[in-house]
Amino acid sequence: MAASILSRLTACSMLVVASAMPAPAQDRGTLDPKPLPPLAHPDAPSTPAKELFGRRAQPAPMAARAIGFYAKGCLAGARALPINGATWQVMRLSRNRNWGHPALIGLLEHLSVKAAKVGWPGLLVGDISQPRGGPMLTGHASHQVGLDADVWLTPMPNRELTRAEREHMSATDVVASHKRDVDPSVWTPAHLAVIKAAATEPQVERVFVNAAIKKAICREATGDRRWLEKVRPMWGHNYHFHVRISCPPGETSCKPQDPTPEGDGCGAALDWWFSDAVLHPKPPKTPPKPRPPLTMADLPPACRDVLLAP
Ligand SMILES: [Zn+2]
């Protein structure tokens, strides 16, 4: 029964952007997004869940709920971050990824105002989640439950960006080419201020940044350093930082992650990131087998209801 509904939906009403590209923040979007072609066998158990969630262009009209884990789940009752606010603008509109749990959308709106008060004129917001969350066809292992958002390391210009700019302009790489530190010609105190503004929000559980950015923040942060615990080094994240909030209170369907290790994560804790093996990795003799994509069976059963909701 559910299977036949799935075929019908997939064959007709799921229209969304086809972006045949990997999707880090700096990758260009398109002004002419094409609907994805219908799937030949949407009901097959082996169908990657990203092919199904990637074809849903509207949120599931249900009570808001994060279901599953950041990297294995979906989102009911998503809210869209409006594409323009006084202190934010959404980028790469063609991706249709400005959807999140209402708690996260509210946090971003609040953060944008707070950031503007500490010298960061406004947020350029990259990917949040798909309308129903779930795995994505391009980029991101996480961002599946509507509690993760990418914010560009480019301050918002003092004007409304055009559609073309939102698709084509590049985010700013703040890391030096040697990867051991930030680029002093790009990095500013306002970069630290906006990351601190995010990390000091109680709902924010982690902020992911490149290790070189973490190193700069460790060096430059003054006063109370407890918020540094939340700023975690991560691959990439040199063009944007990633804000992750906790499971919303009372949402038992949301699977929390382990707490961050104690301490500010500075000094020797960063050494590994700057080791030769990490900065200049040798290609493996045998390339690792790609992990099979998540299927519906890998996601919480409630994600099927989210996918199939009208
Ligand atoms: Zn991210």
Image (spheres, rainbow, N blue to C red):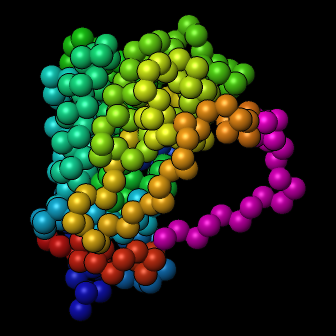
Q: For the point 24% across and 17% down, which residue is it?
A: 117
Residue 120: x and y, percent? 32, 17
Q: Which residues are magenta?
A: 275-294
Residue 252: x and y, percent? 27, 71
Give the farthest residue toward the bottom: 1
Left/right placement of residue 264 relative to residue 204 reads right
Q: Is residue 283 above or below residue 14?
A: above
Q: Quadrant of residue 13?
A: bottom left
Look at the magenta stretch and give its main secondary structure. Answer: loop
Give the farthest residue toward the front: 224
**Nearer to me, 300 or 169:** 300
**Nearer to me, 263 or 240:** 263
Q: Is residue 105 above or below residue 219?
A: below
**Nearer to me, 4 or 38:** 4
Q: For the point 36% across and 77% down, which residue is it?
A: 300
Left/right placement of residue 21 relative to residue 181 reads left
**Nearer to me, 294 or 255:** 255
Q: For the point 43% across and 27% down, which residue is it?
A: 224
- Image quadrant for the N terminus? bottom left
Residue 102: x and y, percent? 18, 51
Q: Quadrant of residue 168?
A: top left
Q: Is residue 211 above or below residue 113?
A: below
Q: Is residue 285 magenta?
A: yes
Residue 40 can be seen, yes or no: no
Q: For the point 47% across and 12% down, which residue is it?
A: 188
Residue 28: x and y, percent? 44, 33
